[in-house]
């Protein structure tokens, strides 16, 4: 039985294809993709789709893809029902709380506004701290929001720290580490056990 795999396009894509390559899967279509979004493995009965991170979870949850590659950040933000089976150890970064220097958000009195692409992660983090903050959902370039006064601080991903630094923001606290994970559809895990385990064990040898 063939399997389908939803890959997250963008930052994780190149490193994911490298692992597939090392594990000797047929990646030539993926490496010469043009604007195509569906690819056949030229060695095995595998189909790959290239999708946005959150959609990778959606395709796996609905069983359209058996396996997905997706960042832990997106998994933490979603209320998904897939099995998270492997840490690929790539796309490493972390969730942080940041603000303009000199803003002690955790000891401020009064209304605090936090901008983030990740409202669920933000809500959980401040809830654990016993803080009731207003969360403002932002789609991108989150670092801009405190500079322009839209919010007091942000919850975002930091990889190299360059974006924060170049925009004059400082880290107030680390929330958690992030990396890319393999997720599996629950029904596929039973129905295609052999194929999925074979795929997973070959990947595991190369991470
Ligand atoms: C992410 C994140 C930060 C930046 C961090 O944004 O939201 O802005 O990368 O990376 P760094 O620590 O290496 O500078 P992304 O590039 O995905 O774009 P976006 O802001 O438009 O979402």
Image (cartoon, rainbow, N blue to C red):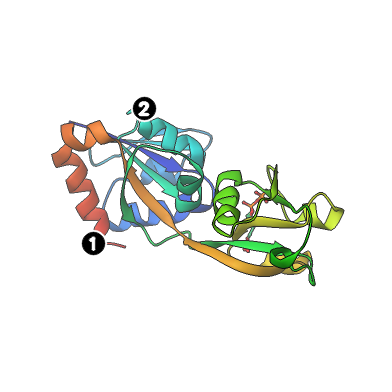
- In the rendered image, which residue does mark 2 sit on? 62
Q: Position of residue 206 (x, y in %)?
A: 28, 62
Label 1 sits on a secondary structure element that is loop
**Nearer to us in this view, 174 or 141:** 174
- In the rendered image, which residue does mark 1 sit on? 205
Q: Is residue 152 left or right of residue 162?
A: right
**Nearer to us in this view, 195 or 81:** 81
Query: Quick check: can you spot residue 160?
Result: no
CA–CA distance between discs 1 and 2? 28 Å
At a point 86% along the width and 53% down the height, the residue shown is: 148
Q: Quadrant of the N terminus?
A: top left
Question: Are discs 1 and 2 less than 8 Å apart at CB?
Answer: no
- Residue 171: quadrant of the picture: bottom right
Label 2 sits on a secondary structure element that is loop
Disc number at residue 134?
none
Tell me if residue 28 comes above or below residue 100 in the rendering.
above
At a point 76% along the width and 63% down the height, the residue shown is: 108
Marker count (numbered) = 2
Q: Quadrant of ligand 1?
A: bottom right
**Nearer to us in this view, 153 or 69:** 153
At a point 23% along the width and 61% down the height, the residue shown is: 205
Q: Position of residue 51 (x, y in %)?
A: 48, 37
* Mark 1, other Cα within 10 Å: few <14 / some 14–19 / many ≥20: few
Q: Is residue 51 left or right of residue 193?
A: right
Tell me if residue 86 comes above or below residue 64 in the rendering.
below
- Residue 156: quadrant of the picture: bottom right
Q: Residue furthest right?
A: 148
């Amino acid at each position: 039985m063939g399997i389908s795999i939803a890959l997250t396009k963008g930052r994780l894509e190149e490193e994911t294809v490298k692992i597939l390559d090392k594990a000797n899967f047929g990646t030539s279509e993926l490496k010469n993709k043009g604007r195509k979004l569906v690819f056949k493995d030229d060695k095995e009965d595998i189909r790959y789709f290239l999708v946005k991170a959150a959609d990778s979870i959606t395709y796996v949850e609905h069983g359209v893809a058996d396996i997905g590659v997706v960042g832990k950040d997106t998994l933490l933000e979603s209320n998904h029902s897939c099995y998270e089976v492997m840490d690929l150890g790539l796309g490493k970064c972390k969730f942080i709380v940041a603000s303009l220097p000199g803003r002690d958000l955790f000891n401020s009195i009064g209304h605090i506004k936090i901008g983030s692409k990740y409202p669920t992660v933000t809500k959980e983090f401040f809830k654990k701290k016993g803080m009731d903050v207003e969360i403002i959902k932002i789609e991108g370039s989150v670092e801009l929001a405190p500079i322009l006064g839209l919010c007091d601080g942000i919850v975002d991903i930091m990889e190299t720290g360059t974006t924060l630094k170049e925009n004059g923001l400082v880290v107030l606290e680390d929330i958690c580490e992030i990396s890319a994970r393999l997720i599996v559809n629950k029904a596929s895990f039973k129905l295609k056990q052999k194929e999925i385990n074979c795929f997973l064990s070959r990947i595991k040898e190369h991470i």
